Image (cartoon, rainbow, N blue to C red):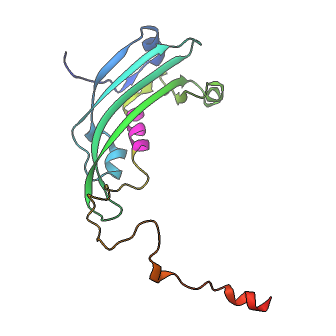
Amino acid sequence: MKNLKLPITIDPFKSAQRTLVCDGYFDLSEFDRLRAVTEKCCGQMNVKIQFKVDEQGLNVVSGSGLTTVGLTCQRCNEIFEQKLSIDFQLSPVKKAEQADELPSYYDAIELDENGEVNLRELVESELLLAIPLIPKHELDDCQAPANSTWGKLPEELDKPNPFDVLKQLK
C-alpha cells in the first residue's frame, strides 16, 4: 500500500457517511505556524484520520499521528529532538453556537465557507498544542552547568524576611 499525501480540505459529512479512513502524510514544510516556533521541522508526518457517524448521530473526525521536531532547551539553550504525538476526536459544527451542544468528549471544529474541514490546519493546530509549555532535555542529557539547581533555591540565597521588622512594632 502506497503512502499517499492527504487532501488539504475534505467534506466531513460525506466522508462520515462513507466511514472514510485517510491514511497518509503531510509535509512538515507546509506547516508555517509550526516552523515559526520550532528550530527544526522537516520531513513528513504520517497521519491516520477516520470519519464516522457515532451512536448519537454526530459526525466524528478522529485521528492520530507522530512526528519529531527540533526545539530549544530552556535550561541550556541547545537544540534537541522532541517527539510530538497527536490524538484527537472532533465533531464538525456549522456555527460556533453548536459547539456548546456537543458531548464533553468531542471538541468542535468549525467548517470553512465551503462546508469543509481543513485537515492540514487541523493537524498543525494539534501539533502546536502538543509542544511542551517549557521544552527541555531530560536532566541527564542537558548541557546546563552541573552546579545549577532546579526547583529550589540554594541555602546561601536564603535572605531574612524584610517584614520581620514589623513584628517588633507589634
Residue at the far left in the pictured view: 2
The image position of residue 43, as x and y in percent, is: 21, 38
Residue 132 vs 6, above or below: the answer is below
Residue at the far front in the pictured view: 155
Residue at the far right in the pictured view: 170
Residue 42 vs 18, above or below: the answer is below
Residue found at x 26% / y 54%: 80
Residue 79 vs 45, above or below: the answer is below
Horizontally, residue 139 falls left or right of residue 15, namely left
The image position of residue 85, as x and y in percent, is: 36, 37
Horizontally, residue 139 falls left or right of residue 163, namely left
The image position of residue 46, as x and y in percent, is: 28, 29
Q: Which residues are magenta?
A: 121-130
Residue found at x 45% / y 65%: 151
Residue 123 vs 147, above or below: the answer is above
- In the picture, which quadrant includes the N terminus? top left
Nearer to us in this view, 115 or 106: 106
- Check if residue 77 falls in the magenta segment: no
- In the picture, which quadrant includes the C terminus? bottom right
What secondary structure predominates along the stretch shown in magenta?
A: helix
Give the total number of marks visible in the rendering.
0
Find residue 148 and report its image quarter: bottom left
Find residue 147 and report its image quarter: bottom left
Residue found at x 41% / y 56%: 134
Horizontally, residue 28 falls left or right of residue 133, namely left
- Check if residue 123 falls in the magenta segment: yes
Horizontally, residue 7 falls left or right of residue 116, namely left
